Amino acid sequence: MGGMLEKKLETRADRTLCLENKSWLPCFGDLRALIMHESHKSKYSIHPSSDKMYQDLKKLYWWPNMKENISTYVSKCLTCLKVKDEHQKPSGLLVHPMIPQWKWEKVTMDFITKLPKTLSGYDTIWVIVDRLTKSTHFLPKKETDLMERLMRLYMKEVASRHGVSVSIISDRDGRFTSQFW
């Protein structure tokens, strides 16, 4: 250990080293990796961002380059790479879309949610609008419907009548980011 750091470390009764009342984690062994794993991937955590994880861990632990180590660890988490918004294509600046040449070539989609349930159990309306003619389909659905149901509904109600659209504009709803669309 460096002389300056050694002077700042205190030894607790249980023989752990502390720096400003935070447990100091040495580099040897996998203790740092274990702490990061428990903080990020355990069944009690919810895959926090690197900033959130750092803020939580710095209250209890300290080691050199801690923030950088945590950032690297989180950036390699496969679950986070698949799920988190910051890994999707950036939205960029707003641009006025070109006017379509053909009916139903380009559409917009959105959901109207949290409606009172119908007798059939529907509580959401899926709104699909042709951008050229403004013709619209209002499709009843349940907020809990899975992607498979949305695909079947789209194929039955829209694609069978107008063909498959070339372009879809949505509000980046997670339901519209799958491979089907």
Image (cartoon, helix red, strand yellow):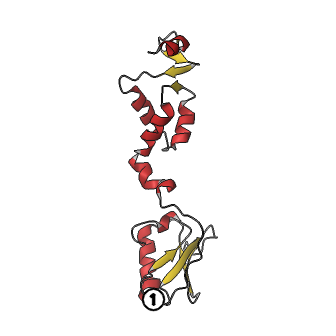
In this view, the residue farthest toward the left is 29
Q: Is residue 69 above or below residue 87?
A: above
State which quadrant residue 178 falls in: bottom left
* Residue type marked 1: His
Against 157, residue 91 (above or below) is above
What is the x, y in percent for residue 63?
Answer: 48, 25
- Compare residues 20 and 108 and report the one nearer the observer: 20
Position of 146 relative to 15 (above/below) = below
Residue pictured at 49% horizontal, 15% vertical: 17
The residue tagged with tag 1: helix, strand or loop? helix
Quadrant in which the N terminus appears: top left
Report the residue marked by disc 1: 162
148 lies left or right of 141: left
Position of residue 65 measured from the top left corner of the image (x, y, whole percent): 48, 30
108 vs 62, nearest the viewer: 62
Q: How crowded is mark 1: few (under 14 residues within 10 Å), some or many (20 or more)?
A: few
Residue at point 43% right, 45% down?
Answer: 75
Q: Where is residue 163 in the image (x, y as percent from the top left)?
A: 42, 87
Vertical arrangement, residue 147 with respect to residue 73, above or below = below
Tell me, yes or no, if residue 54 can be seen here. Answer: yes
Q: Is residue 23 left or right of residue 82?
A: right
